[in-house]
Image: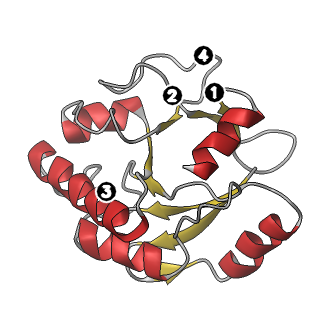
Amino acid sequence: MGLRQGHRGTYYKNPYYTQQYNGSYDVGMIRGAYHFATPDTASGAAQAGYFVDNGGRWSKDGRTLPGVLDIEWNPYGDACYGKTQSQMVSWIRDFLNTYKARTGRDAVIYTSTSWWKQCTGNHTGFAANNPLWVARYASTVGELPAGWPTYTMWQYTSSGPIVGDHNRFNGGLDRVRALAEG
């Protein structure tokens, strides 16, 4: 399974995105793309539109995962991008609704429990429709954001013998394919 960074805000597209996205598909991998949110630079709808327009689509081919909204600590400033918890929930809803309207799929949410608690007030409203990809660098997945009874994916480290993130899918290959098929 290959997940490739595609986009950030409405201003950045990974220059290797097309090669990586198509290359992983061409060798038979299940692929996907994620969008690193910058809620202080543009609306959720604008960023979802940019993501879809620049390769963050989903296709019902059994080998393309729904897009991922990467919503986490702001590496450039205020942890919550200067938004209140209510404003952040509205921003996320705007992104998710636009993504679904454009693709027919619910996006996966990538976040950490600590960020989710601080910046959304541990909002439960997305758990019913949006699969969770939780970031927690530890030996166990630990507490999940409120509302999600389980995770779909878990990023458990960002280092190791091979440079890159390490993730675990919560289920077998048949469940990965089911997520890709919609």
Amino acid residing under circle 2: Tyr
Q: Are marks 3 and 4 in contact (CB under 8 Å)?
A: no
- Between 157 and 35, the residue placed more toward the observer is 35
Which residue is tagged 4?
140
Amino acid residing under circle 1: Asn
Is residue 40 at all visible to an observer of this figure?
no
Question: Which image quadrant for residue 76?
Answer: bottom left
- SS under mark 1: loop
Measured along the vertical axis of the image, is residue 38 above or below residue 18? above
Please tell me the numbered disc located at residue 151.
2
- SS under mark 2: loop
Marks 3/4: CA–CA distance: 28 Å
Q: Residue at the spot x=69%, y=45% of the render?
A: 165
Dot 4, how many residues are within 10 Å of its Cα: few (below 14), some (14-19), or many (20+)?
Answer: few
Amino acid residing under circle 4: Thr
- Between 162 and 148, the residue placed more toward the observer is 148
Horizontally, residue 135 falls left or right of residue 21, namely left
Which residue is tagged 1?
170
Dot 1, how many residues are within 10 Å of its Cα: few (below 14), some (14-19), or many (20+)?
Answer: some
- SS under mark 3: helix
Q: Are marks 4 and 2 in contact (CB under 8 Å)?
A: no
Which residue is tagged 3?
96
Q: Residue 124 placed where, x, y %?
A: 24, 30
Q: Are marks 4 and 1 in contact (CB under 8 Å)?
A: no
Question: Mark 4 or 1 closer to N-term?
Answer: 4
Question: Mark 1 or 2 closer to N-term?
Answer: 2
- SS under mark 4: loop
Marks 4/2: CA–CA distance: 12 Å
Question: Mark 4 or 2 closer to N-term?
Answer: 4
Q: Are marks 1 and 2 in contact (CB under 8 Å)?
A: yes
Marks 1/2: CA–CA distance: 7 Å
Q: Are marks 3 and 1 in contact (CB under 8 Å)?
A: no
